[in-house]
Image: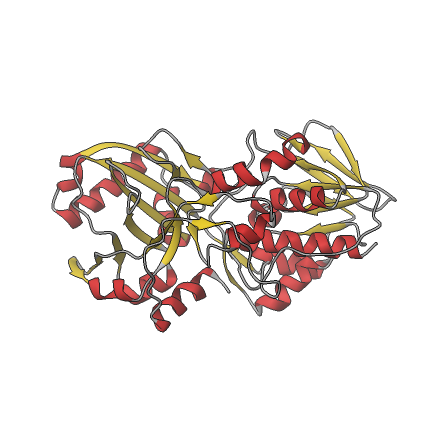
């Protein structure tokens, strides 16, 4: 299920949930589990390209099965689109992936560790004050609070979840600041070349980089990718992405503000303003902006962060009659479109049948090079647990091919 479909079904089905203070890490049922079980005799080495959610999850699974692996990350930090700010507010802020778009039991399923008794504070995200801005008018839609809910971390973030439960198991296997520029899979071994002409060698490779980096051919393949795979990769739309957080002296904004038709805006989820401190037990007033695709491009194409914040503040002042400027304290901006190894938000739509496009991309290259990531999950595309699901599924396929 895509992120868009999840929100749409929540609205249509009238999902309303009580406040949850914490969740014990208890896994989903076996039938619903994304954590695979398999037997493998594989004794070679796997290299994972990319240390985002999919790459970290893939390494975690290989570690559990005793398979030799290494994770090669282009950036100076791991996490990819999992990222947090620890010192902007009195609670950690997800400046990357933020919402848990399914039952929080998925957290236990990702780590699949019966010995873990850790509690994670989770809140139900069901905004109580909901407004829309359309044709210069601000309208209230608070009735939607009765049937719209998702989940969020309370005192932590998606990044913290991985840092606490996934990374400690695999930290010694992560290599940073090594952008892979070429992958040669025509010999017995797969050779990976970095931009500094360093060479890595593996028996199998799992590529977990964002789909945008594959579209822009940041990695050259030898032999070149088959035509049908290249065409399939280019049929996935991943647009611009930006998040802005502003601290204000007081709260003058609703829990969530949509733009245009309220149901269309919530369904498409391309731009909304929200109370980022909602149910966080915070003493701060933190407003967030989430924007993707063309709605994000209006900001990401600007030349500087100052231009971005000036544009957004002007919008807020128009909507709230100057209260934004009057109450401004500080801000942070995460322009995902400017991140060189990410280049946007997440996969959003497909030019054709999603299942066929994903199947073509997922088809391994000579049973040596495999692909995974949020864009390649059929049921949970564009979500963090979808990235994990894709990685787990492809590692299972890789090991079963032996």
Residue 73 percent location from the top left of the image: 62, 35
Residue 65, horizontal then vertical, whole percent: 74, 46
Question: Which residue occupies the extreme left position in the image?
Answer: 321
Relative to 31, residue 205 above or below: above
Q: Residue, x 57% and y 60% (percent of image)? A: 235
Q: In this view, does 334 lie to the left or right of 195?
A: left
| Residue pictured at 44% horizontal, 66% vertical | 5
Q: Residue at x 50, y 55 (%)?
A: 105
**Residue displayed at 46% across by 38% down:** 83
Residue 73 visible? The answer is no
- Quadrant in the rendering for residue 257: bottom left
Q: Where is residue 166 in the image (x, y as percent from the top left)?
A: 58, 40
Of residues 19 and 49, which is closer to you in this image?
A: 19
Horizontal side, residue 130 vs residue 175: left or right: left
Snapshot quadrant of residue 154: top left
Q: Report whether 138 appears left or right of 192.
A: left
In this rendering, would 399 be left or right of 24? right
Which quadrant is home to the C terminus? Answer: bottom right
Look at the image and name its color scheme.
secondary structure
In the displayed structure, would residue 325 be above or below residue 395? above
């Amino acid at each position: 299920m895509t992120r868009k479909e999840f929100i749409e079904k929540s609205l249509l089905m009238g999902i309303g949930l009580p406040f949850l203070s914490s969740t014990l890490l208890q896994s989903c049922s076996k039938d619903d589990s994304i954590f695979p079980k398999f037997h493998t005799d594989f004794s070679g080495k796997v290299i994972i390209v990319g240390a985002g959610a999919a790459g970290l999850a893939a390494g975690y699974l290989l570690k559990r099965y005793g398979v030799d692996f290494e994770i090669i990350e282009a950036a100076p930090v791991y996490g990819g689109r999992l990222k947090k700010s620890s010192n902007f507010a009195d609670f950690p802020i997800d400046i990357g992936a933020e919402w848990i778009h399914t039952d929080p039991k998925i957290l236990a399923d990702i780590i699949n560790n019966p010995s873990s008794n850790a509690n994670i504070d989770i809140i139900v995200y069901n905004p109580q004050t909901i407004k829309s801005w359309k044709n210069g008018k601000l309208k209230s839609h608070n009735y939607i609070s009765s049937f719209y809910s998702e989940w969020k971390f309370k005192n932590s973030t998606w990044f913290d979840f991985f840092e606490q439960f996934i990374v400690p198991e695999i930290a010694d296997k992560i290599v940073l600041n090594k952008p892979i520029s070429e992958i040669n899979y025509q010999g017995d071994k797969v050779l990976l070349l970095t931009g500094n002409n360093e060479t890595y060698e593996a028996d199998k490779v799992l590529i977990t980089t964002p789909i945008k980096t594959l579209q822009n051919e940041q990695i050259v393949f030898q032999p070149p990718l088959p035509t049908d795979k290249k065409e399939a990769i280019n049929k996935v739309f991943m647009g611009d992405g930006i998040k802005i957080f502003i601290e204000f002296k007081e709260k003058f904004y609703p829990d969530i503000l949509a733009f245009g038709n309220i149901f269309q805006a919530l369904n498409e989820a391309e731009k909304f303003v929200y109370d980022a401190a909602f149910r966080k037990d915070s003493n701060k007033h933190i407003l967030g902006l989430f924007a993707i695709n063309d709605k994000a491009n209006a900001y990401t194409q600007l030349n500087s962060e100052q231009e971005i914040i000036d544009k957004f503040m002007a919008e807020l002042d128009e909507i709230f009659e100057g209260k934004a400027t009057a109450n401004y304290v500080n801000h942070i901006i995460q322009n995902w479109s400017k991140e060189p190894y990410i280049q946007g938000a997440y996969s959003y739509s497909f030019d054709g049948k999603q299942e066929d496009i994903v199947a073509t991309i997922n088809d391994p290259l000579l049973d040596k090079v495999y692909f995974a990531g949020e864009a390649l999950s059929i049921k949970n595309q564009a979500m963090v647990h979808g990235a994990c699901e894709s990685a787990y599924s492809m590692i299972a396929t890789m090991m079963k091919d032996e």
